[in-house]
Image (spheres, rainbow, N blue to C red):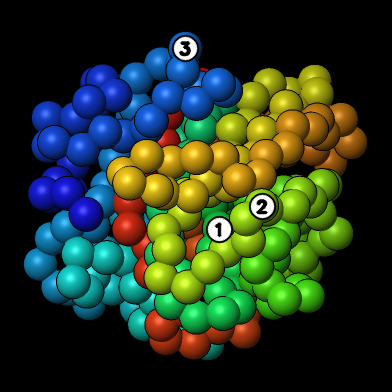
Amino acid sequence: MGAMRGCVALVGLASACGRIGFEAQPATVDGPAVGFVDDFERADSSSLGNGWVEKTPGTYKIAAGQAVRSDFVGDYRDDIVVRPPAEDLLDVEVAIEFTVGHLPPGYPQVEARIQRGTLGAANTLDGYLLYIEGVTGNGLGTAALTRQHGTTLPAPLTTFALSPELALNETYRLRLVVRGTAPVALDGFVEHEVGGTFAVIGSISTTDAAANAVTSAGAIGFATGQPEAAGYYVYELFSYTPR
């Protein structure tokens, strides 16, 4: 990782901390500047700091410049961590980098439009998720984009294949773009880091015109899944961009 130290409120693709927030990709090359980047490069801590709010305190920690899960009791509906309310957005691109430490890797994921009312309710979450289907089949070759409501993981709105599949000790990036309301437009990307550059290994675009589509601004964040254990993966860098 680079030498960033919890950078916030960046105003350009090239950050003042020496890390490029996004390499240009067809879906985002003409987009606005990155709004927030956190590479987790700070002192080891029992919490994430830097403005992060955990639904269940004590779920994550900073270790060796990475965001690491430290409590494995809850699932994503309870272990989600989000940015503060002042950063809620309707239209956003959110991304997270992760390095695979176990095969299958579990459910690395990013979230957008998470409704604040569900952050105070146990085992409940409303919003949009992009995640690796990390224990389905061989857990290496499929990503899913889902509209989440309530207490259960619904069938995905759509899934897409990854080629090549995820590999041990490799670094990847999830990118979720959510825009509009009638319908909601959704784009999902999984990218593989090779030589400091991210290449798309799977992507999908879809719309959500259902009556229960999430059409209100919401929280931005990331989570983890179940069943998982220490060492399945670590998060390396998080960012979001108003769209």
Chain-order first, disc 3 or disc 1: 3
**Which of the 4 image quadrants contains residue 14?**
top left
- Give coordinates of residue 158: x percent, y percent: 82, 47
- Cα separation, mark 3 vs mark 2, equals 26 Å
Does the residue at mark 2 contact the one at mark 1 (Cβ under 8 Å)?
Answer: no
**Residue occupied by mark 3:** 30
Note whether 167 is above or below 202 in the view shown: below
Taking the image as drawn, is residue 122 in sight?
no
| Viewer-closest of 49 and 64 | 64
Residue sitting nearer the eye, 3 or 228: 3
Please provide percent x and percent y for residue 220: 48, 44
Q: Amino acid at mark 1?
A: Gln
Amino acid under disc 2: Ser
Identity, as a three-letter code, of the amino acid under mark 3: Asp
Comparing labels 3 and 2, the label whose residue is closer to the camera:
2
**Among all residues in the image, which is located at the extreme top?**
30
- Reading the image, the residue beneath label 1 is 109
In the rendered view, tell whether residue 226 sits above or below residue 201.
Answer: below
The answer to whether residue 182 is seen in the rendering is yes
Q: Write the residue at 77% across / 65% down.
A: 153
Kindly identify which residue carries mark 2: 163
Find the distance from the CA under tag 2 to the CA under tag 1.
18 Å
| Residue 210 lies in quadrant | top right
- SS assignment at label 3: loop
* Label 3 packing within 10 angstroms: few (<14), some (14-19), many (20+): few
Q: Name the N-terminal-most of marks 2 and 1.
A: 1
Q: Are marks 3 and 1 in contact (CB under 8 Å)?
A: no
Q: Residue drawn 55% across and 21% down? A: 26
- Indicate the secondary structure of the residue bearing disc 2: loop
Q: Quadrant of the N terminus?
A: bottom left
Q: Position of residue 226 (x, y in %)?
A: 62, 80
Residue 145 falls left or right of residue 16 = right
